[in-house]
């Protein structure tokens, strides 16, 4: 893997806008949870491909990994607005809202819309079930019992 990283870095030294090298190196950094480096590389790639919903979503997941949930949510929403068929962006938005933020009601709204668009998607169905289960088990938002 280190040889590949070196080769990709060399390619980027020769051509800082080599999209394939940026995507591959960002992906490798993503895989090892090197969030700051993945963010840097995905940001560079997004600057070259501003409407690429896969890059937006991967960048959002990287920001989530770095604990920057607001930025992650912005990117997921932007990706889903850019291409409503790219369900993975809304999936990640619902996940962050629920599992990271504990805002089960907001997560439910996102996943309800996603299920309407993806009625046969097993991943979406599993997420919807888990969000509904966790939402029922969560204490009321106002703290009342």
Image: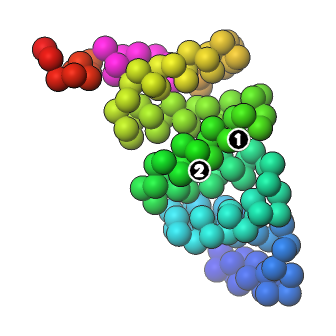
- Looking at the picture, tell me which residue is in the foreground, 22 or 32: 22
Please, which colouring scheme is shown? rainbow
Query: From this viewpoint, is residue 145 visible?
Result: yes
Dividing the picture into quadrants, the one containing residue 114 is: top right
Position of residue 72 in the picture relative to residue 103 (left or right): right
Q: Are marks 2 and 1 in contact (CB under 8 Å)?
A: yes
Left or right relative to 35: residue 48: right
The location of residue 46, given as percent across then percent down, is 75, 59
User: Residue at image x 81%, y 48%?
Assistant: 51
Would residue 131 be counted in the magenta stretch?
yes
Q: Is residue 95 left or right of residue 1?
A: left
Q: Which residue was labeled with disc 2?
A: 60
Quarter of the image for the C terminus: give it: top left
Q: Which mark is residue 79?
A: 1
Q: Which residues are magenta?
A: 126-136
Examine the rendering and report whether any part of residue 125 can be seen: no
x and y percentages locating residue 6 in the rendered image: 71, 84
Q: CA distance from mark 2 to mark 1?
A: 9 Å
Magenta-highlighted stretch: main secondary structure? helix
In which image quadrant can residue 90 be found?
Answer: top right
Give the total number of marks visible in the rendering.
2
- Of marks 2 and 1, which one's residue comes earlier in the chain? 2
In which quarter of the view is residue 104 placed?
A: top left
Residue 78: give x, y in percent of width and height. Answer: 68, 41
Q: Reply yes or no: does residue 71 show up in magenta.
A: no
């Amino acid at each position: 893997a280190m040889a590949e990283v070196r080769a990709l870095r060399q390619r980027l030294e020769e051509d800082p806008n080599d999209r394939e090298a940026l995507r591959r190196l960002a992906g490798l950094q993503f895989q090892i949870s090197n969030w700051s480096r993945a963010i840097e590389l995905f940001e560079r790639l997004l600057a070259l491909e501003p409407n690429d919903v896969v890059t937006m979503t991967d960048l959002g997941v990287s920001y989530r990994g770095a604990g920057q949930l607001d930025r992650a949510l912005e990117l997921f929403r932007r990706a889903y607005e850019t291409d409503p068929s790219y369900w993975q962006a809304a999936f990640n938005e619902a996940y962050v809202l629920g599992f990271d933020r504990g805002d089960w009601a907001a997560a439910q709204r996102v996943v309800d819309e996603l299920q309407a668009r993806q009625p046969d998607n097993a991943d979406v169905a599993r997420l919807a079930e888990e969000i509904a289960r966790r939402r029922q088990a969560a204490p009321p938002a106002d703290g009342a019992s």
